[in-house]
Amino acid sequence: MALNKEKIIEGVKLILEGVGEDINREGLIETPDRIARMYEEIFSGLNANAEKELSKTFEVDENNLVLEKDITFFSMCEHHLVPFYGKAHIAYIPKGRVVGLSKLARCVEIYAKKPQLQERLTNEIANAVMNYLDAEGVMVVIEGEHMCMAMRGIKKPGAKTLTTAFKGCFKEDFNLRKEVLDLIK
């Protein structure tokens, strides 16, 4: 299903009117259109997966640990439609083939660009790397700060949420998980 720009524009106008704003005020006249254009970008991961990005691989002689850490991401909390953001760390053990490092960052980007839960985001990334790379194992760690906790409700800016996903050999091997966690620190 494609994004419906006109519905977004009308919805934003209703929200602005609902909070008591004048939608014809100079600073707000173009806001509904700006938000619709922004939503095209920040929700571009809807109905997408990382298969294409993770399909171009390169042969390796040894199946050693690959870790890409500190991948910055921005997403939108599906409960409040406010941002959450942070860093993703992806580790995997290849089966004779590796993917270009930028493709791991693209994988994070795809799954982050939709209304999301951090827990689901973590698992979607891990499943994509595991399935599309046919890896021996995958570990994903995400550290996120949620604006729904920082600016409203409990109002605890700086609180971080940490989520993990372990697939394949990472599920069984505690020492391998510990090695990756030590490398992330």
Image (cartoon, rainbow, N blue to C red):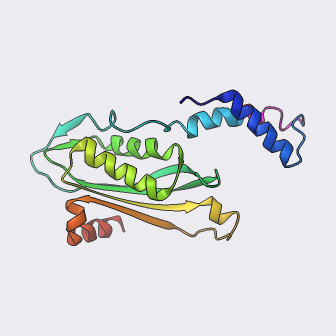
Residue 140 in picture, x, y percent from top left:
35, 58
In the displayed structure image, the side of residue 22 where residue 142 appears, left or right:
left
Identify the residue at image location x=28%, y=65%: 180
Location of residue 90 by image quarter? bottom left
Q: In the image, is residue 93 above or below residue 102?
A: below
Residue 158, position in %: x, y? 59, 68
Q: How many marks?
A: 0
Q: Quadrant of residue 164?
A: bottom left
- Name the spot of residue 23 as percent of width and height, x first: 87, 37
* Image quadrant containing the C terminus: bottom left
The reply to whether the magenta stretch includes residue 27 is: yes
Q: Position of residue 27 (x, y in %)?
A: 84, 38
Say whether residue 145 is left or right of residue 16. left
Q: Quadrant of residue 84?
A: bottom right
Horizontal placement of 112 versus 42: left or right?
Answer: left
Residue found at the far front of this picture: 1
Residue nearest the observer in this picture, 147 or 124: 124
Q: Residue at x 55, y 28 (%)?
A: 2
Q: Is residue 64 magenta?
A: no
Residue occupying image coordinates x 35% and y 41%: 102
Q: Is residue 97 above or below residue 138?
A: above
Residue at (68, 69) in percent of width and height: 155
Q: Which residues are magenta?
A: 26-33
Q: Main secondary structure of the magenta part?
A: loop
- In this orientation, which residue lies closer to the viewer: 15 or 96? 15
